[in-house]
Image (cartoon, helix red, strand yellow):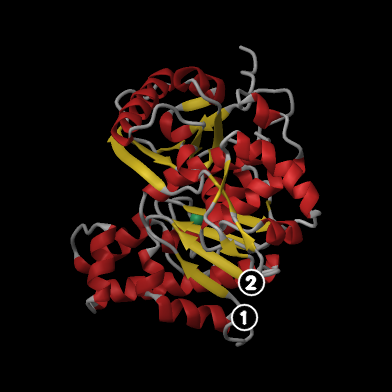
């Protein structure tokens, strides 16, 4: 099985890097005048006009209504990307669900669907993805998409090498060394990129979320597992499955509760959904789902409040360690369990400050949406980035 060739349009393949920078700038920061763009990207206005003309002709860029240029006051028509005309498919695969979104070029969700994975074989999942694409496209009145991205928990990165297929390990789906990209490309009929789900979410926040405009930030995801990604100097720091597996088991309080691997007081022992449910269930003497623990804690239930406060303090210590080691100043919290950081905000902040030598405000913590579809959006974002930067 050979590598499936990229199928971007001929015009797009031939674009110089400077043209790609223009598209990237417009996607991330919105419509701008030619003079403002030229200034930001250190190009002459002549070069800018020469670079943008073929992209305007091809319909990738559009000109807005006449406004007065903020730089020189002259009337101008700001450039923008034709976001709505460039749709992308994003998928997130879990052990039992496929979450699908169609987004525009700015990762704005146009259509979304979540459904159970009917058959776990890679071929069947690809067929299901195709059906989802067809149904969502028809519902949104779209005739084609540009590309697709799949966010998947597991090792979708470490075997990526130039000239070699990227093979995916996804233990929760029973997949080992699956050549998912070419398989998905054949099923969908468009270029496809596969990425680790936490990395995909970091890319999403970097371009379109709390990390927009930041060169450095860390992402921590809270849910069934604890995820971590680090963006430094505008690039994602490459990590292996071993690195990522370690992160969730960093010990933050040696006397704390125990995780299934026998660590006392590791991050997972405090923060994983099951740990939170078990700790609350022990006090309440009944099984209690994660969302109910958060609700009860917010209502002042003493058992759930204690569980959430202890977990939030552990998260504060974890964030203190991350920021001290990596020296990033912003930490984005996301994932389906992120409500914990909101309910336990005061304890999180207190523990963070205490572990940063009592310098309050030295780190900016942002708790994001806990919507599961954000992961699927992350899938669309890696496809968008691959399209814009020309890498895969
Ligand atoms: Zn552990």
Q: Which of marks 1 and 2 precedes in the sequence?
A: 2
Q: Is residue 179 above or below residue 258?
A: above
Tell me, yes or no, whether the two marked residues, 2 and 1, touch with CB atoms within 8 Å: yes
Which one is in front, 176 or 263?
Answer: 176
Which residue is denoted by mark 1 in the rendering? 362
The residue located at (32%, 30%) in the rendering is 117
Q: Quadrant of the N terminus?
A: top right
The residue located at (29%, 26%) in the rendering is 118
User: Residue 212: x and y, percent?
Assistant: 58, 61
Label annotation for residue 329: 2
Q: Is mark 2 within 8 Å of ligand 1?
A: no
Disc 1 packing (10 Å; few <14; some 14–19; many ≥20): some
Local SS, label 1: loop
Q: How far across and how far down the image is residue 167, in percent? A: 59, 26
Q: Nearer the viewer, residue 274 or 127?
A: 127
Residue projecting furthest to the top: 1
Left or right: residue 281 compared with residue 232: left
Q: Quadrant of residue 356?
A: bottom right
- CA distance for labels 2 and 1: 7 Å
- The C terminus appears in which quarter of the rendering? top right
> Is 59 in front, or is 126?
59
Kindly identify the residue that appears in the image at 49 percent across and 20 percent down: 189
Residue that appears at 47% across and 33% down: 171
């Amino acid at each position: 099985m050979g590598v499936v060739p990229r199928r971007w349009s001929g015009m797009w393949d031939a674009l110089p890097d400077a043209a790609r920078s223009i598209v990237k700038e417009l996607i991330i920061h919105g419509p701008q005048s030619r003079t403002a763009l030229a200034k930001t990207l250190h190009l002459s206005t002549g070069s800018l006009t020469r670079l943008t003309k073929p992209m305007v002709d091809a319909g990738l860029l559009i000109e807005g209504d006449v406004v007065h240029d903020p730089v020189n006051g002259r009337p101008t028509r700001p450039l923008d990307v034709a976001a709505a005309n460039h749709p992308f498919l994003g998928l997130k695969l879990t052990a039992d669900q496929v979450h699908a979104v169609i987004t525009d070029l700015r990762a704005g969700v146009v259509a979304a669907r979540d459904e159970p994975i009917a058959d776990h074989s890679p071929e069947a999942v690809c067929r299901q993805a195709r059906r989802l694409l067809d149904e969502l496209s028809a519902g949104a009145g779209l005739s084609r998409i540009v590309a697709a991205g799949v966010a998947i928990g597991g090792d979708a990165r470490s075997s990526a090498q130039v000239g070699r297929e990227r093979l995916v390990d996804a233990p929760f789906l029973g997949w080992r060394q699956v050549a998912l990209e070419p398989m998905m490309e054949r099923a969908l009929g468009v270029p496809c990129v596969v990425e680790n789900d936490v990395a995909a979410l970091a890319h999403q926040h970097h371009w379109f979320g709390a990390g927009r405009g930041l060169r450095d930030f860390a992402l921590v995801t809270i849910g069934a597992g604890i995820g971590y990604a680090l963006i430094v100097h505008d690039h994602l720091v490459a990590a292996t499955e071993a690195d990522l597996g370690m992160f969730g088991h960093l010990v933050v309080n040696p006397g704390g509760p125990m995780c299934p691997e026998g660590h006392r007081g590791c991050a997972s022992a405090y923060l994983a959904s099951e740990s939170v449910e078990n700790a609350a269930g022990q006090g309440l003497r009944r099984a209690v789902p994660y969302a109910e623990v958060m609700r009860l804690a917010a209502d002042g239930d003493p058992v759930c409040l204690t569980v959430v406060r202890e977990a939030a303090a552990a998260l504060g210590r974890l964030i203190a360690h991350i920021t001290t080691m990596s020296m990033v100043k912003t930490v984005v919290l996301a994932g389906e369990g992120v409500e914990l950081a909101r309910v336990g905000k005061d304890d999180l902040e207190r523990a963070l400050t205490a572990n940063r030598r009592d310098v309050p405000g030295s780190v900016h913590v942002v708790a994001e949406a806990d919507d599961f579809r954000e992961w699927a959006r992350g899938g669309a974002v890696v496809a968008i980035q691959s399209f814009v930067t020309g890498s895969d």
